[in-house]
Image: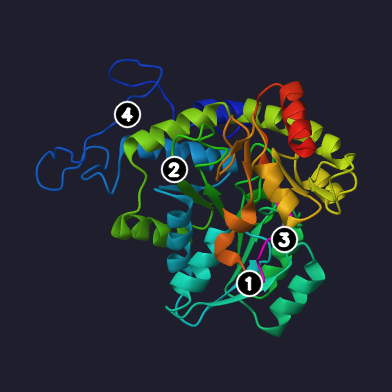
Amino acid sequence: MTSHTARGFASLAVHAGQEPDGATGAVIPPVHFSTTYAQDGIGGLRGGYEYGRSGNPTRTALQAQLAAIEGGAHAFSFASGLAAEDTLLRAALAPGDEVLLGSDVYGGTYRLLARVLGPWGVRLRVVDMSDLDAVRAAVEAAPPQIVWVETPSNPLLRITDIAGLAEIGHAVGALVVVDNTFATPALQQPLALGADVVVHSTTKYLGGHSDVVGGALIVNDDALAEKIGFLQYAVGAVSGPLDAWLTTRGIKTLAVRMQRHSENAAAVAAFLEGHERVARVYYPGLSSHPGHALAARQMSGFGGIVSVALESGEAARRFAESTRLFTLAESLGGVESLVNYPDAMTHASVRGTEAAVPVEVVRLSVGIEDEADLLADVEQALAR
């Protein structure tokens, strides 16, 4: 495979894993739908392919692309973000092991650990990962096997010092996992900052068009990669060929999309921060954000997610149901703008837990539409 290591991010996103088809010269590699592959004699595999679960050329191309844009040695593509997380946890943990989890995370991650892997014997503790002193105290009190963080976090946009967290985790032999879904590798490179594993819901910004569900893991460690690869094959939650191709197509425009997402989100955040009906705006691009300086050092942009606290839970619900351009829907990271009420939607599964989201909070996934139209929609929704 052609080396892409010296190229810039946007070039890697377009070209890594995307060599023209050898047989026809097609600039866009074909989608391989075959579930099985002819063998040249028993065990004589062409390119290592035998069966669609163990390998598919379209998925291979996506995994090469994912590894390149995250600066990792190995990448694995899955049928969903949670499938990727589950595979990593199975690969790295045994019954009795513990995960130290950020207090502000996607509700599905908390649910997976607490309700699926908890009965299997995996223990869970929660801490504010943006407070390294609190993390250090928690780690020293009882060393976990995994330290897991989202930064920026979902949905309160807390910022964690990845290099600092890696130092704390590695001091006790813990695996440091960073969910990079919100920032994407276009804005943040966790492996370069010391993380061991990067997790993605590729459904979000990497796919980028709200039309494909997927997940990914990117690692450097060969031994961990071997365990993940075995479980990817043995458990089988792989991305299908069309899903892989759609994700690859989305990644090719990631650099320009994240720039536009960030510009629009900054404008929306600035408008909201000055509004009399808004109690608080969560956006790391604002100088008022407690993690702003760290985000400016650690990221090359501030992303497309803005969360906002209204006067009450009722006000938040009314706002979420009053937007017109922002569509009321779960998920995030598509080219279209979405509004979500986490308490009753994406984070309903963590109600009543230490990871619960305040009822007055609304999350905005700011798309790539015209800035003036976005601001007008937010303004009319606040008025209503």
The label nearer to you, 2 versus 1, is 1
Position above or below: 74 against 384: below
Which residue appears at 90% of the width and 44% of the height?
287
- Asked where in the image residue 58 lies, by quadrant, the reply is top left
Q: CA distance from mark 2 to mark 1?
A: 27 Å
Q: Earlier in the sequence, mark 2 or mark 1?
A: 2
Mark whose residue sits in front, 4 or 3: 3
Q: Residues within 10 Å of mark 4 (few under 14, many from 20)?
A: some
Which residue carries the number 3 mark? Answer: 358
Residue 196 position (above or below residue 188) = below
First in sequence: mark 4 vs mark 1:
4
Quarter of the image where one finds residue 104: bottom right
> What element does badge 1 sit on?
loop
Query: Tag 2: residue type?
Result: Val
Q: Nearer the viewer, residue 29 or 303?
A: 303
Numbered circle sitting on residue 31: 4
Amino acid type shown at disc 4: Val
| Residue 85 percent across, percent down from the top left | 48, 59
User: In the shown orientation, is residue 327 left or right of residue 165?
Assistant: left
Q: Is residue 201 located in the magenta-colored stretch of the structure? A: no
Whole-Å distance between the Cαs marked 4 and 3? Answer: 44 Å
Residue 348 picture location, percent across and down: 57, 60
The answer to whether the residue labelled 1 contacts the one labelled 3, judged by CB atoms less than 8 Å apart, is no
Task: Please give left or right for residue 236 compared with residue 329 in the image.
Answer: left
Q: Mark 2 highlights which residue?
A: 213
Q: Residue at x 66, y 43 (%)?
A: 320
Q: Which residues are magenta?
A: 354-361
